[in-house]
Structure formats: C-alpha cells, structure tokens
Image: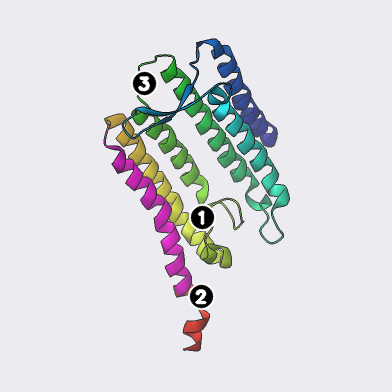
Amino acid sequence: MKSIRSEAVNILLIALSFAIVIYFWDRLPDPMPTHWGAKGQVNGWTPKPWGPLIIPLMMLGIYLLFLALPAISPRGFRMEGFIKVFRILRCAMVAMMFLFNLLIIAIVLGAPLKMERVLPVIIGLSLMVIGNYLGKVSRNFFVGIRTPWTLASEEVWLRTHRLGGRLFVLGGMVMIIAGVAGLPVAIWIVAVALASLTPMVYSYFLYRRLEGFKGEADN
C-alpha cells in the first residue's frame, strides 16, 4: 500500500506540473526564462514549446529512470534492502522539481518572488530530507555517496553516509537561512560544496585507516 501511495504522489506531482503549464500556456512568454544568475537576474531563455515544458519533462524522465534503477542494479549491490527509503528520496527529488516549476511560473507571471531567495529554501528543504535518510541507504551503484572507497567497503559506506547525512541536513539549514535572510549566494554555495565534498574526502582517509592499500601493506 505504501508503494502505491508513493507512486501515486509522484504521478500526481508530474501530472499537476504538466497541467499547470498547459493552463497558463497562453500567458507564458516566448521565449521562456529558464536560467537565472546568482543575483536573480534572468540570463537564459528557451523558446516554446520546450521552455515551459523543460521542468515537467525532466520530472518525468527522472521518475522513469529511478523507477528502473532497482531492476538493473547488479547482484551484490541490490536496492531492495532500502527500497522504502529509495522511494522517499525519489519523491523528494520529484517534489523539489515540482516546487521549482511552480516558482518559475509564478515569477514569470509577475508574482513578487525572488529566485535567489526562494530557490535556496526549496533546495535546502530537499537536502534536509535527503540527509535525514542518507544513513539508511545501503551500498549500491546509483544512490548515495559513491566513491571507490565506499563501494569497496561496507563499513566505509556506512560511516561515510552517516556523516554525509548530518552534513546534508546542516547544509540544508544553512541554505534555508541564507535564502530567508537574503544572504550572499556564495554562503550557501560553500555550504553545499562542503556538505558534498567532505564525505568524499572522509571516505578515502577512513578506507585508508580501516583497510589500507596494497602498496602500504607491502612496505
């Protein structure tokens, strides 16, 4: 039943995204703003029909891709052990893009919203959701912090994802605060970079401490 509800939520969000675009189609400009700079200025446009449909099509593509991943995951790295968490993460991705699509349409139609302030909040919330569940993701090739060292060691994978989960939540909080307070974009970019890169570096040194390397053993 939970699986059915999860699929229903994803399909509903994708369908609503297409429906909203179609409803406002005549009021949407051609070309459509599709990229914003660090200070919230539009610096990229895409003509119709692709401009308004980019985000809904991306949502559909990501959903279908994520739907196929458990079936193509190789033996020894199967995803059934965390499939419930995987569905939550997939839904979080689709929901984030749904909100992003709403934000773009609202701004284009004249709503008093600023991309540089609302977008960090949307991404920050998504990072917090992902971080909350990251530690429950078991070793696989598609989801999580996939470095040579996490894939080579179950223990390194587990510890790295526990750290990464905490950092993702912290980075998400920084993004939300930065967006609400109107802080410089550089602050939340640094926060996201640290949350993403720190676990990768940590996985190397942890593997080196726990497992070592052949050359070191020979010496």
CA distance separating discs 2 and 3: 51 Å
Local crowd size for mark 2, using a 10 Å CA cut-off: few (<14), some (14–19), many (≥20): some
What is the three-letter code of the residue carrying label 2? Answer: Glu
Left or right of 111? Residue 27 is right
157 lies above or below 45:
below
Q: Which residue is mark 3?
A: 113
Q: Position of residue 47 (x, y in %)?
A: 53, 23
Residue 135, how many percent across, how many down?
51, 52
Residue at 63%, 43% in the rendered image? 84
Frontmost residue, 52 versus 69:
52
- Which label lies toward us, 2 or 1? 1
* Residue on which disc 2 sits: 211
Res. 145 mark: 1
| Residue shown at the point (61%, 56%) measured from the top left | 141
- Going 45% across and 50% down the picture, which residue do you hit? 165
Q: Residues within 10 Å of mark 3 (few under 14, many from 20)?
A: few
SS state under label 2: loop
